Image: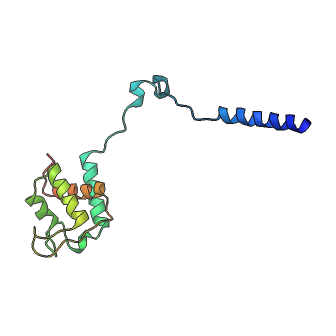
Amino acid sequence: MKRTSVFGLSLAVCIALSSCGGKKETTATQEDYGTPEATEAAPQTSASEIIAQGESLVKASDCKTCHHPTNKIIGPAHTEVAKKYEFTAANVKMLADKIIKGGSGNWGEIPMTAHPDISEADAEKMARYVLSLDGEKEH
């Protein structure tokens, strides 16, 4: 009888403990986050900071094997790319896609090497840097 009551008591304690530790859904309140003024959004990166990041990414990559800022090597000079394409979001996206997937035909028959290891965000920063080299601002 003593063993049965100890077993029963142990079972009851286990059930009680497991029911207390379950997931609890909560709804966030104003008190959880403070006043709207205290929860200001994180500062956004400026266009010049993004272009500087793009420049660093270009300099750290193998771009310089085929491209130079002002002189044609195997591929066009980056300034020539900037002069050919308007600095628009659509062209940033298009050039970022070319950086990642490679391509040929726009500047001759020598294909541009694909860079699938470069993220879309980094490729867009690189494209913004290149498109900024003729002094044009994104519009």
Residue that lies at the very extreme toward the front in this rendered image: 1
Q: Quadrant of residue 69?
A: bottom left
**Which residue appears farthest toward the right when viewing the image?**
2
Residue for point 41% across, 30% down: 39
Task: Look at the image and tell me in which quarter the N terminus lies.
Answer: top right
Residue at 17% across, 49% down: 89
Give the residue at x 71% y 35%. Answer: 15
Q: Can you give x and y, in whole percent of width and height, for residue 8 in the image?
A: 81, 35
Look at the image and tell me whether residue 132 can be seen.
no
**Rendered residue at 28%/49% (across/down):** 49
The one of 89 and 126 positioned closer to us in this rendering: 89
- Quadrant in which the C terminus is drawn: top left
Q: Residue 15: in sight, yes or no?
A: yes
Answer with the quarter of the image where residue 111 lies. Answer: bottom left
Where is residue 53? Give x, y as percent: 30, 55
In front here: 136 or 105?
105
Residue 6 lies in quadrant:
top right
Q: Nearer the viewer, residue 23 or 39?
A: 23
Residue 10, position as x, y percentages in the image: 80, 37
Please say if 3 is above or below 38.
Answer: below
